[in-house]
Amino acid sequence: MNLGSLYRSIGEYALLMRMAFSRPERGKVYWRLTVAEVYKLGVQSLGIVALLSLFMGAVVTLQTAANIDSGWIPKWTIGFTTRQTMILEFSSTIVCLILSGKVGSNVASEIGTMRITEQIDALDIMGVNSAGYLILPKIIAAVFIFPFLVMISMSLGITAGAAVGTSTGAISLTDFEIGLQYYFDTFDVTYTLIKTLFFAFIITSVSSYHGYYTRGGALEVGQSSTRAVVYSIILIMICNYMLTQIMLL
């Protein structure tokens, strides 16, 4: 992408977001759409989030236990490491990267299909704000439901770590609990949830943009979905670095 195309894309994205956040024509319709999107984007993603969180919590616990060979390192370090890993990075950044593939591709392909089948043109002809009608409910739903997914991920990961650690004899439950409580700062959870809000907006808005401006046929819809996932991941990583620099340092 050359510099001119980048500027054009940024301009198109800004104008699309302006249209998406304009005042809705009928609030009740948008409310029903938002509830449907909460189920589609959030509830239907719960399974993969739960599965990954359970295994990641277990793996972090076992890897930490396997690398503590010295008697100078207390056993509660295992619980501390599991807690920090799940809260600070995995449950927010990694889970949202995974959701960018599942949710982002779904959003881009859905809106892209509507574009090439002229359904969006039909909405515009009827006087409906197609950008707001199609995009705003998705953004609101993701910003609302993603923090709940992240909190579930944190809880499941830590629980799985405790269960695996105690069942394998790597650490006692008492030591694990000491590690969980050691120097716990509630701001870590706040930081994670703030990141999640930004990531949710990036995933839905960027994917909607690529779907909305799809041109061509089925092949182009697939290409738009791929671009939506790639650019969402890049922006999430940039945003993650910037928020960490601002909030933790």
Image (cartoon, rainbow, N blue to C red):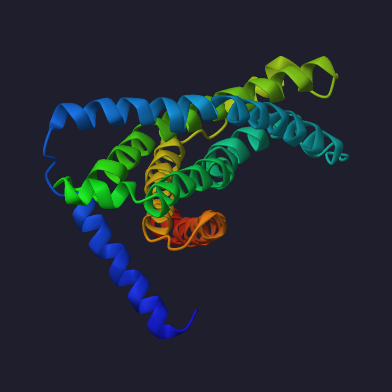
**Residue 191 against residue 78 in the figure, above or below:** below
Residue 76 visible? The answer is no
Q: Is residue 22 left or right of residue 7?
A: left
Q: Residue 36, relative to residue 196: is it above or below?
A: above
Count of marks placed on residues: 0
The residue positioned 17% from the left and 45% from the top of the image is 128
49 left or right of 110? right
Going 62% across and 30% down the picture, which residue do you hit?
48
Q: Work out which residue is located at the far bottom of the displayed protein and give it.
A: 3
81 in relation to 114, above or below: above
For the point 14% across and 40% down, which residue is it? Answer: 24
Please name whichever residue, 127 or 151, is drawn nearer the observer in this view of the structure.
127
Q: On screen, 143 above or below 165?
A: below
- Answer left or right for 158 relative to 243: right
- Residue 197 position within the rendered picture, expressed as x and y whole percent measured from the top left: 37, 43
Q: Percent from the top left, x then y, of residue 239? A: 44, 58
User: Does residue 144 appear in this view?
Assistant: yes
Q: Position of residue 16 (x, y in %)?
A: 26, 59
Q: In terms of image quadrants, where is residue 52?
A: top right
Q: For the C terminus, give its image quadrant.
A: bottom left
Residue sitting nearer the eye, 166 or 146: 146
Q: Position of residue 82 (x, y in %)?
A: 66, 34
Residue that appears at 33% across and 42% down: 139
